Each structure stands twice: as C-alpha cells, then as structure tokens.
Image: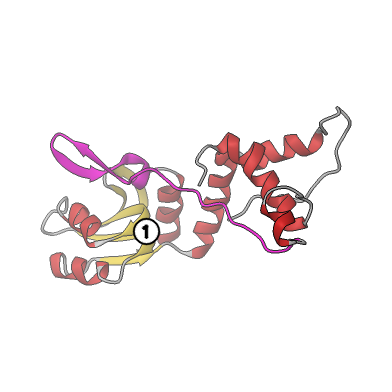
Amino acid sequence: MERSAETLAGYAVPRLEKVCRGQDPGGITESVGWRGGGGFRILDVAPSMFIESGGYVILADWAVNGHLAEATAAQLGYEFHYDPPFCGLKGRSLLAVVDGLITVEVVDLIAARLEETERVVICGTAVSEDAETALKAISPGSRVRRIPASILADYRTSRRRLFGIREARQNEDRQAPNGTAATAMADTTRP
C-alpha cells in the first residue's frame, strides 16, 4: 500500500497500467506468463474524522465543513450556516454533514449539541445500519440520510483533482523520457 500522491503518480500507477496492458516484462509477469488484463483502483484514505479537543473527542472540521456541506445544504433547502458540527439551518431543524460513515458514535456526538426543541438531519457519505435507530431514540423527529449520489459524484471528482494524480499523469504523458512529445493517454484517475 502506497500513501504518497507523488509515488502513486510517478511509479505505482504507471507500473500498474503497464501490467494491465501486458507491457511490464519484470517482476512476476514473466515467471507466470502474464499477458495483460485486469484493472486496479486507487483508494483515497482520509485522515481520522475524530480529533481530541480539551479532553473531548469531537468531529474534525474537515469532516463537517466545506464544499460537501455547502452542496448538501443547498440540495436539501437549508441555509448554509457553519456552527460546528452543524452547517445548515431551516427553522428549528439543523443540518450536519459528515464526510464519512455515520455511526452511533457520530450520532451521539452530534445529538449532544442539540437543544431540546431542535431536530437534526445528519447526512453522510455512508450510513451504518444502526445510526438511524440510535438518532430516533435520542431525538425523535431527527433523521439520518445518505448524501445523494449526484452530490457525491461532483464532490469525489473535485477531491480527485486535489489529490493530484490527474495533473501528474497529464504532465508525464505530455513529455516522454527522451524529451519528445508523448502520445496522449486516456485519463487514468480511478474512483
């Protein structure tokens, strides 16, 4: 497993592409008679969504703020208003957006910030089976939702751009090792 974006762009992705095309004569390829095929995916592993602050475990700002929160608030008709862990307001309903899995622990952290008359809609990129039940027990009328696929598609595309593989591969494809222009290759960024 490789974590460096530079190493992925400069070494791992080009090698994996060659293996899939059957153009990598080294390694195990020769000994097993590999002729190409298959594929691979790049997994973008984010840092922990929890941090310690003042003796308490809280959701990190990156997990509840930013473009994903703004897009989700707009889609669901909430006024974007950042007041961690909430990012939206519609009457007495608050919106919390989590860039990650909503678990019972996440529900507990968010629900602990609610006033008695407030309700919350917690949206996440993934939702555990017991999160909805836990929230309803703590705050009847509150809901857990998975972020709509259309929002996630746009968000993940922007995240991949930040990751830098696309730009690194495009630069690499423009310049061959001998200094001549290289043939343009298809975008190899994987979801």
For the C terminus, the quadrant is bottom right
Residue drawn where x is 46% and y is 64% of the image? 148
**Tally of numbered tags:** 1
166 or 64, nearer to the observer: 166
Kindly state the secondary structure of the residue where label 1 is placed: strand
Q: Is residue 31 above or below residue 49?
A: below
Residue drawn where x is 68% and y is 49% of the image? 27
- The residue singled out by tag 1 in the image is 124
Q: Is residue 117 above or below residue 133?
A: above
Q: How far across and how far down the image is residue 73, in percent?
A: 40, 54
167 or 25, nearer to the observer: 25
Q: Is residue 161 left or right of residue 63?
A: right
Q: How far across and how far down the image is residue 101, in percent?
A: 35, 58
Magenta region: which residues? 36-65
Image quadrant where residue 9 sits? top right
Main secondary structure of the magenta stretch = loop
Residue drawn where x is 50% and y is 58% of the image? 151
Q: How far across and how far down the image is residue 52, in percent?
A: 21, 38
Q: Is residue 91 left or right of residue 15?
A: left
